[in-house]
Amino acid sequence: MKIAFQMDPITAVNINADSSFRLAEEAQRRGHSLFYYSADMLAFQEGTLTARGHKMHVQRVEGTPAILEPEEEVALSDFDVIWLRQDPPFDMHYITTTHLLDLVHPKTLVVNDPFWVRNYPEKLLVLNFLDLTPPTTIARDLETIKAFKAKHKDIILKPLYGNGGAGVFRLDEGDRNLSSLHELFTGFSREPLIVQKFLPDVSNGDKRVILVNGEPVGAINRVPAKGETRSNMHVGGRPEKIGLSDRDYEICAKIGPLLREKGQIFVGIDVIGDYLTEINVTSPTGIQELERFDGINVAEKIWQVIEAKRA
């Protein structure tokens, strides 16, 4: 098959951690041809969706993860599969790319389905499963957020469309910074904020469970660095081997059918203690860590689903 990757710069990825690299590596091993372009190079030109990018060969070489051929312009309808893999922020630029990719999907299979990526942002999709999530409020109004804090005392405040742990704050019962943080966030963004009750279990780790076509294939535990509340690996969280609990399987059984129905083939959910906190569909990570810990080929499982759909 002809596979295109819409992603952040391939030349800058960490070959031992990046999930997009691992997906490309496995595709190449399976005999598929690879093409890379950035979201900035996506265009709609008089009825044709195009991208300027490079045919590529990936290699597990530090500093040179991909050999790129000269730049060329291609029609994306000529491809069998397009991977939507650029990282958030989930802003209007990101949303526009999903609208454009809708023009070739499903004749060209876009993974994950761009319509539902657009309509199921990670911190909003969990609102469909309130029995699985911690107490949560989404609001821009300061008084509403203050009332939530007064009720739950110890809270997490974060931007609704952020990623990688950026802008995440813990405000405990004695903290006096809520108004200042609200002023800071609303000063540069018109988006609401999300607040959740703080879960002390985060000190034991924030579990990333990987689902392939709605089925759990394994998990890694991300443990916060000393003195940190955030467990994201972008900010120093340490990945550890961990198994799936009965509660993890219960959560996956409830959300899996919806993910499968909406074409969300590769998904990473975040679980703290017994609570589901996020459903990551835009550009989930964790494949390589899970493969090392559990000795399984997660990328192969993902490609098997895609190849069956294309067949």
Image: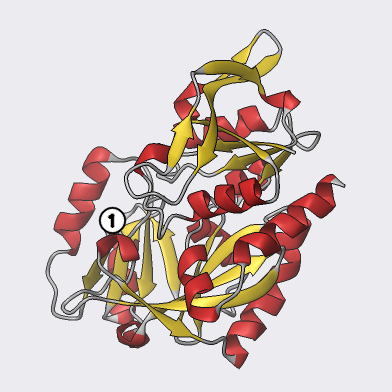
Quarter assignment of residue 79: top right
Q: Which one is in front, 5 or 153? A: 5
The percent coordinates of residue 223 (x first, y second) are 32, 79
Quarter assignment of residue 235: bottom left
Residue wearing tag 1: 166
The percent coordinates of residue 133 (x first, y second) are 52, 76
Q: Is residue 245 above or below residue 177?
A: below
- Does residue 20 appear to the left or right of 166 in the view shown? right
Q: Amino acid at mark 1?
A: Ala
Q: Is residue 77 above or below residue 181?
A: above
| Label 1 CA crowd tier, 10 Å (few <14, some 14–19, many 20+) | few
Q: Is residue 255 above or below residue 103?
A: below
- Total residue callouts: 1
How are the residues colored?
Answer: secondary structure
Quarter assignment of residue 301: bottom right
Does dot 1 land on a helix, a strand or a loop?
loop
The percent coordinates of residue 24 (x first, y second) are 57, 47
- Does residue 304 appear to the left or right of 82 in the view shown? right
The percent coordinates of residue 14 (x first, y second) are 36, 52
Residue at coordinates 65% horizontally, 74% vertically from top-left? 216
Q: Which one is in front, 118 or 246? A: 246
Q: Kindly give the residue lying farthest to the bottom in the view shown.
A: 246
- Residue 73 visible here: yes
Q: Kindly give the residue lying farthest to the top in the view shown.
A: 46
Residue at coordinates 64% horizontally, 74% vertically from top-left? 217
Q: Which one is in front, 283 or 145? A: 283
- Does residue 144 appear to the left or right of 56 in the view shown? left
Residue at coordinates 38% horizontally, 54% vertically from top-left? 163
For the N terminus, which image quadrant? top right
Residue at coordinates 59% horizontally, 43% vertically from top-left? 118
- Residue 134 visible here: no
